[in-house]
Amino acid sequence: MSTYDVIVIGAGPGGYVCAIRCAQLGLKTACAEGRETLGGTCLNAGCIPSKALLHASHSLYEATHNFARMGLKTTAPKVEWDAMLAYKDDAISQNTKGIEFLFRKNKVDWLKGWASIPAAGQVSVAGQTHEARAIVIATGSDSATIPGVEIDERTVVSSTGALELQKIPGKLLVIGAGVIGLELGSVYSRLGSEVTVIEFQDRILPGADGEIAGTFRKILGKQGLKFITGAAVRKVDATETGARTTYGPHGSNEEATLETDTVLVATGRRPFTRGLELDRLGVNCSKGGQIVTDSRYATNVDGIYAIGDCVDGPMLAHKAEDEGMAVAENLAGQAGHVNHDVIPGVIYTHPEVASVGETEESLKERGRAYKAGRFSFMGNGRAKATFSSDGLVKLLADAGTDRILGCHIIGPAAGDLIHEVCVAMEFGAAAEDLARTCHAHPTYSEAVREAALACGDGAIHA
Ligand code: NAI
């Protein structure tokens, strides 16, 4: 038996970051992980592999749609699916090995195996029980399915199966127009699949800013994705060549069917805490299965903490990482804190979609007076030169104080542009602060500044 200051359970972005920071702050730390590689869902079957396939399929799009426009004559590239999957696997392996290196460098012990918690202060892994002053649960989430739909990871797949399909489907049905559905729907659409997305709500990306979601739907429609909104999937049956999906408008008996080679179920994720026996330990969980914590990520059981997808809040790797660092700082006697009002969200399609803070809908709902500064990438010189002028930046600021409340971007490099607004929000900046900051020309960032100018006396290039 070994004794640690901290044992983190789960080596996804929340867990591994927490473990490294604990070790850096002088705590004797171990991290239990049952997968054969570190990095959790994000590195092994989520963020990283999907970004590799998004990059490869976008490169194909560029070659087939934009090369000739730039005077680059070439024959259209042929997709070798096995080689593309191997590239994706290489991206995974480089990243997971990187975490192993960081564990060794920071002297974090990797306890290999699935952990259980026999009692507060104890963690069992592979038949051995270890003691720890603090246990941090960072076990993440897994795909949630819907009634009538069984995932077999061959024909009916979750995001995990969608990242290793045997072949590119001729026809793909995506259930759910959320982040996973739209990212992976984009990948296969660019690789030649006929992609239909069925969404329960009347719009895509429920919860996102409505104007941005509407613009996004039009752009994806132009790229060839078909959308059926306001429809519930009732069942998916296997056929000889794939699957038959029955769906219809919710609240009505009308029914239609759609036959496809593959069905991707992207209807959300749920906390993954199986095997931890939280009930027996008396750890409080919500109805949705999230572990309940206080603002310091402590559960109701002394010495047990929880972070990331298995607690409340957006299921995002970077939110988990920040919570991991905060809990490590708290355990080391510092004052760790995460500002949940400033957590960016990014969809890595082309164009990218990024957001932070309030939406127009959330501000209206709360009756808060605001102003919106908009700037279209049509007025951005750099975007025009790179065929990426579809989209806009929308900055939301308080009508009275001009303080920035939120920002929503659809356009080139949106996922990078959003961060200047995040920093501004952390510093409590006004739209005028951004507007008066000199931005280099020609950059996409000028569009953010123009949106800030539009909150005041007006944008220049609109
Ligand atoms: P999601 O919650 O983003 O979207 C699920 C969608 O499915 C919703 O639009 C919902 O209305 C719809 N839906 C639910 N039941 C349905 C039904 N019966 N028929 C039709 N539509 C139905 O969940 P998603 O896309 O599965 O992603 C899971 C989590 O992973 C999210 O929290 C997401 O933020 C995160 N994620 C983040 C990524 C990123 O940051 N780029 C990438 C991938 C996932």
Image (tube, helix red, strand yellow):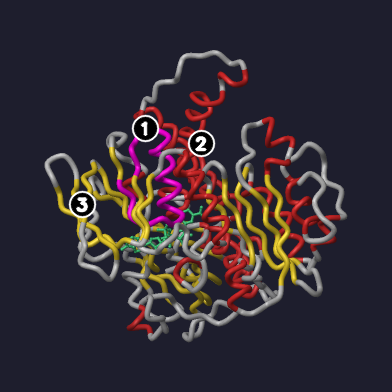
Residue 337: image tag: none
In the image, the residue with mark 1 has its CB under 8 Å from the nearest atom of ligand 1: no
| In the image: residue 163, left or right of residue 388 | left
**Marks 2 and 3, the one that precedes in the sequence:** 2
| In the image: residue 31, left or right of residue 289 | right
Magenta segment includes 186? yes
Tell me the distance, in whole angstroms, between the alpha carbons under discs 3 and 1: 22 Å
| In the image: residue 109, left or right of residue 415 | left
Residue lying at 63% horizontally and 68% vertically, measured from the top left: 358
Q: Which residues are magenta?
A: 173-195
Q: Dot 1: few (<14), some (14–19), or many (≥20) neighbours within 10 Å?
A: some
- Which mark lies nearer to you, 2 or 3? 3
| Viewer-proximal residue among 253 and 105 | 253
Q: Which residue is mark 3?
A: 257
Q: Which residue is mark 1?
A: 192
Residue lying at 36% horizontally and 79% vertically, measured from the top left: 278
**Marks 3 and 1, the one that precedes in the sequence:** 1
**Residue 221 locus on image (x, y percent):** 45, 44
**Marks 1 and 2, the one that precedes in the sequence:** 2
Magenta segment includes 309? no
Rendered image quadrant of residue 343: bottom right
| Viewer-proximal residue among 154 and 337 | 154
Q: Which residue is mark 2?
A: 55
Q: Helix, strand, or loop for circle 1?
A: loop
**Residue 94 locus on image (x, y percent):** 50, 39
Tell me the distance, in whole angstroms, between the alpha carbons under discs 2 and 3: 33 Å
Q: Quadrant of ligand 1?
A: bottom left
Instruction: Give the number of callouts.
Output: 3
Q: Amino acid at mark 2?
A: His
| In the image: residue 98, left or right of residue 112 | right
Residue lying at 43% horizontally and 35% vertically, measured from the top left: 190
